[in-house]
Amino acid sequence: MQKTRNIFLLLALLSLVSLTSFKLGEKKRELGAIVTENSPLDLTMMWKVKNELAKSFLEKDKMVDKDMVQGAIAGMVQSLGDPYTVYLPPKENKSANEDLAGEFGGVGISLGFKDKSLAVMTPLPKTPAEKAGIMAGDLILKITDKAKKIDKDTSGLSLNEAVEMIRGKVGTEVTLKMFREGKKESWDVTLKRDNIVVPSIELEYKEKDGKKVAWIKLYKFTDRLYTEWSEVVNKIKKENTAGIILDLRNNPGGFLQASVMVASDFLKDGIVVSQQSSNGSKEDYRVDKSLGRLLNNKLVVLVNGGSASASEILAGALKEYKRATLVGEKTFGKGTVQQPEDFPDGSGIHITVAKWLLPNGVNIHKVGVNPDVEVKYVLPVVPTGTETNKDTKLPDNQLDKAIEVLLKM
């Protein structure tokens, strides 16, 4: 029904450019008063503005009806004041629908908002952004790309507009003006775009005091995780480990059901998360009792400001049930659900339709989840001119603390 209403509204707005008279039964009604299912939408002023533009605007070749309609729709959606509810013209929608499990030309940044300012949710591992020292929580104030003729402040940009500007052909450059809390001034960083491959999960074993610890780095809750998670669990069960470090740092989320699956291997029973919709209904996502393969393993969860959405749900549930100790920094605070809808012309809309509630009923949106043991990340000092790669082992004070906490449990 939601998709039907959205398509109806789009078609209604598109029909404005044809200057067709409307009839309701046998009665003509004033042009601009379009009736929806609930109430009339008066577009008289829109027509007046369009007529004035048609009469007086200097560069009339720029008045393309299709583009103006898409701009009107985008403005209508933007007026709601929710940065996660956006209308996407065909080109932007195609980019938004790219499979992040594949490859694309970019710099390795997952984007979000902090108080309506464009922010880095996640610098993806081993990418130009991470190598340049960009961190979760950094604000992006401006995007410059001379080749694409972009020199744009990010104020008012939608998420997908920013993604479209930052992505590009491999080997080309984009300059970002950054700001970090605690620093007095902003700075520019020029990044060369590369092939970005978004991983799902990684398993390593860490040794300390003669004990082996399983370190699971969970990058994103993708559809691949349904297979890869079981493979990791089976490997761990074959090893004699002192416990597990579940690293959710800089994990921007993904599929809700995937986070419930992971939680179900650590929890015996209960609600993992509830989804409260705009109509007031609530749906509970409970532990899958057919799993529970890691119920007896000691567990520490690493989080930071880049842990968002589904990763916050997982961390919050494990904390509430006292199943794990959380180490690191407060999470991002993304607790709403977006429903994507595609239209026949290739455009689409992402609508915030619900909010996520932790088992205790708390919504984490703009609040986040606090760690049990707070540890600020200390950025490793890399000598100038040193190129890091997949084999480079840099100090990680948060991971060191997580191992210390685990071995004392």
Image (cartoon, grey):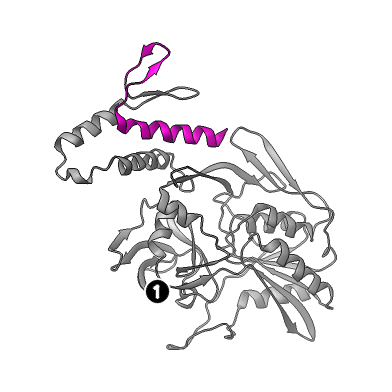
Quarter of the C terminus within the rendering = bottom right
Image location (x, y in percent) of residue 238: 84, 76
Does residue 387 sit above or below 104 in this rendering? below
Looking at this view, name the residue that lies furthest to the top. Answer: 26
Picture quadrant where residue 402 is located: bottom right
Q: Which residue is mark 1?
A: 191
Quarter of the N terminus within the rendering = top right
Q: Is residue 242 left or right of residue 131?
A: right
User: Is residue 6 shown in magenta?
Assistant: yes
Task: Compare residues 55 and 109 and report the one nearer the observer.
Answer: 55
Image location (x, y in percent) of residue 171: 39, 76
* Residue range highlighted in magenta: 1-30
User: Is residue 267 shown in magenta?
Assistant: no
Name the element at disc 1. strand
Task: Compare residues 282 and 1 and report the one nearer the observer.
Answer: 1
Image location (x, y in percent) of residue 393: 59, 85
Residue at figure coordinates x 73%, y 43% from the top left:
284
Does residue 272 sit above or below 392 in this rendering? above
Residue at figure coordinates x 75%, y 73% from the top left:
406
Residue at figure coordinates x 53%, y 33% from the top left:
4
| Res 409 visible | no
